[in-house]
Image (tube, coloured by chain):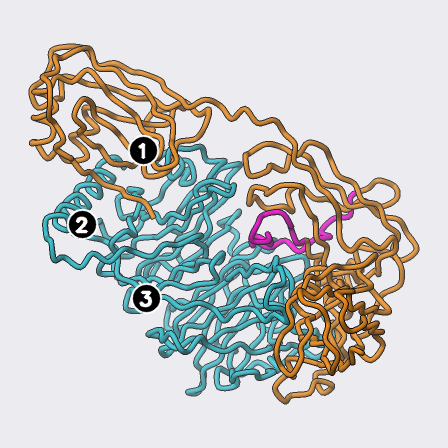
Chain colours: A orange, B cyan
Amino acid sequence: MFAAGLLALALVAGCRQPAAPLSASIAAPTASAKAAIIVTGFSSAELSSLSRASLTAEQWRAIIRVSVDRPGDGNPPIEGQYRVMSTRVEFVPAFPLDAGRAYVVELTPAKLPTPRGVEATRIVVSLPADARTQSTTVTRMLPTAAVLPENLLRIYLEFSAPMSRAHGRDFLSLVDERGEVVKDAFLALDVDFWSPDGRRYTVFLDPGRVKRGILPNDQFGRALKPGHRFALLVDPKWRDEHGLPLAAPFRQEFTVGPADRSPIRTSDWTLQPATAGSRDPLTVTFPKPLDHGLLFRAIGVERGGTKIEGEIAIGPDEKSWRFTPKAAWTPGDYDLLVLSILEDPMGNKIGRAFDIDSFKEIDKSPAPDRVTLPFVIR
Amino acid sequence: MRSSIVKLALVLTVATVTASVSVSARVTPGPSLSSIGTLAFGADGTLFAADPMAATIYAIDRGTLSGARDFKVGTNDVASLDEKIAAIAGTAATEVAIKDIAVDPKSHNTFVSVMRGLGAAAQPALFRVDGHGDVSLVSLDTVKFTSVALPNPPAAQTTGRSNRSQSITKMALVDNKLYVTGLSNEEFSSKFWAIPYPFKSADQGTSVEIWHTSHNRFETNAPILTFVPNKTNGKTNFIAGYTCTPLVRFPIADLKPGAKVMGTTIAELGAGNQPIDMVLYTKGGHEYVLMANTRHGVLKISTDQFGTAPGLTTKVDNTAGVPAEAMTSVSGVVQLDLLDATHSVMLMKVGTTFNLSAVVLP
C-alpha cells in the first residue's frame, strides 16, 4: 500500500560536490514516480556520511522535516522515506502530495552527522494547482418517468464525470411544490452508494417511511404525497473527483402518483423476437418501469443454458429492454433469463412486493434464483 | 506523536534492510487493498479489514501488524484525530474520511481505517492510536494475511456492464465463522454472510434472507446495519440493528444457505434513526449492549431479556420492547468500540472535527 519508513541508498559516486546552502524544491510526479521533496546543497562528503550513518527517522526529521503548511503548532511531519542519492537527498511521502497544497520543508544543517554552523531554514514548496475548471454535471435522475409512485424507494443520479466519494446526502434535498424541504426524506447511512466508476450515486428514500406499518411511516407518513409535485435538488457544492464543485445545480421535478405495491409479473411482459439471420434487437416490454441498474445485469438471453453475448439498451421510462446480439440470430429456441434479484424502483420483486402482509406468504424453500421465458427465433 | 512515527519508521527500516540483504528471503507483499472500510478484531487479535470496492475481506495476522515496535498499551484521547491523520498523510482534514475504528483486544490500541483522498486516486490507510495518544501510520507492506472474496453478484450477462457496488457494514467472528452484513447500491435486501474462518478459498460463505415483523402486519427483509451475538440458555442468537431502528433476534442455527429466516422484533428504539455500532460489555455481573445511533445517541441496553423477550406484535407509537437507557454524557458519536473492561472508545464529531475519546462504560 505504501512504503513508510526509511531506506538509505548509498548511491554516492562520481565527481566530488562542494557544500552549498541547503535548498529544497518539489519534483512533480511522473508516470513512474511519486512527487518528492528534493534537498540539494550537500557536499559529497555529507552525502557519504548520511548514507553511512543509517539515520533513524527521528534523526532524519531533525535535518529535513516536511509537513503540511497550516496554522497551529505541533503539526506532525508527513510520513515517508528518505533516500540519499548521488547529488541530493529525496523525501518520498507515503501518499502522493496534493496539487496546489503548500508544504513546509525545515532544513537544519546543524543536525547533519558533521554539523554545519548555520541557521535552520524554512522553505515552502508546492506543486502547481490543478488548472482544471469545474465541468462535471448531473446528467439525469432515474427513474425518468414524469409520474413516480409515492412508495418510491430508490433513485439514481448520473454524473458526466467521476465524482468524489463524499457522502451525497449532504448535497441532496427533496422539496415540495411550495419549495419547502421535506425533512428526513432519505436514508441516512454512513455508507457510500457509488457505482465503481464514481459516476452514479444511489439515493434511498428512507424505507421506514416508505413501508406501511413501520413506525416512521406511521409517525411521519411517506415523504412523497400522491397528487403533488416534488423536486430533487442537487447542491453544486458536491465535488467531483478532482475536488471541483459541480458546474451547475440540478433540479428534477416530478409528480407523485399512487403507491405501487404490486410484484413484478414476468407473465405480463411482451417479447418481440427478431428474425433469424439478423442482428436486430430482441425487445422486451414491461407494463411498469423496472430498476435501471438491475436491468443491466438481471436479464439476459440463453440458448441451451449458454449465455448469448450482446448489448443491452433500456427504453423510455425504463419500461422496455432491448438486446442486440453480438452475432446474428440463428433459428431455434431461446430463453429470456430473468434473475430473482430484479426489482422495480419501489423494491418490488418478481412475485413479491416490497412490503408483504405476512411472512406466512413467503415461500420458505430456497429462493428460485431465476425465471426463464422461452421464445423462438424464426 | 512525533516520537511514535519516528519509532515506526525505524522498525520498518530494519525490516526493509533485512529483506533486502537476504537473497533467499521470501518477501511476501502485504495485501493490496483498493479501499478500506469496516474493521473487526477476532478474540485472538486477528484484524479483519473490509475492502468494499473489491468486495474482499482481509484477515491480518496481529503479530505482523506491529513489527518490533513497542506501543503503549491502551488508547489515550486524541483531539482532532482527523486533522492529525491528514497531516501525517500530507493533506487536509477535508481530504480524509475515517471509515471505522476497532480496538485490538490484546494491546487495547485503537486502529482507524481511513481513505486518504476523496477522488478516484483515494488510497486506503490504516492508523493506530496507542496509550500515549500517539497516532501512527500502520504499514501493511509486510503483514501476513489471508483473504476471502465475497461471492460474485449474480449476473444474467457475461458481458453486460455492472454499476453494482457492495458495502460492508459489520463483521464479527463467532465460533470460527466470520459473520458479515452489507448493503448493495442496487438490490435493497438483507445480506448476511457466514464465512468459515480460517478462510478457505473454495468456501465463500452463504447468504440468507432475514425478515422481521414491523409491529403491525407488514414484513420486510430490510438491511441489517449492525449486530452482536447473544448466548441465552446455551443457544446463540444474533441481535441485529436494522434501519429505522428495531432490534431483531434470530437464532444462529437458522442461518443456513439460501434460508429465509423470520426474526423476532424485541425492541423498537424510535423513529428517524439509524444504528451505527453495537458492542457487548459486562458490568456488575450483568451484560449490556452499548449502541450508537444517528438520532438517539448512545443507548445502554441490558441483554438479560435478549434471548427470551417476546416479539412485538402490536402497533408501536414511539419506543417499545426491551428497554434502552440513553447515555446523556456523550453526543455526536459516529464510531464506537469496546476499549477494555471499563471503557469504550468513541469517535465523536465536534463541530467539523472528530475527537477520539475513551469513555467510562455506563
Residue at label 1? Answer: A78
Mark carried by residue B146: 3
Residue A219, picture quadrant: bottom right
B135 sits to left or right of A156: left
Distance between the alpha carbons at the discs numbered 3 and 2: 25 Å
The residue carrying pointer 1 sits among few (fewer than 14), some (14 to 19) or many (20 or more) residues within 10 Å by Cα, namely many
- A90 in magenta: no
Residue at (71, 41) in percent of width and height: A138
- Range of magenta residues: A181-202
Q: Secondary structure at mark 2?
A: loop
The x and y percentages for residue A40 are: 22, 18
The mark lying in front, picked from 3 and 2, is: 3
The x and y percentages for residue B326 are: 54, 58
Amino acid under label 2?
Asp
Closer to the camera in the image, A21 or A75: A21
The x and y percentages for residue B301 are: 51, 67
First reached walking from the N terminus: tag 3 or tag 2 = 2
Closer to the camera in the image, B226 or A235: A235
Residue at label 2? Answer: B70
The mark lying in front, picked from 1 and 3, is: 3
Residue B217 visible (yes or no):
no
Residue at (8, 31) in percent of width and height: A53
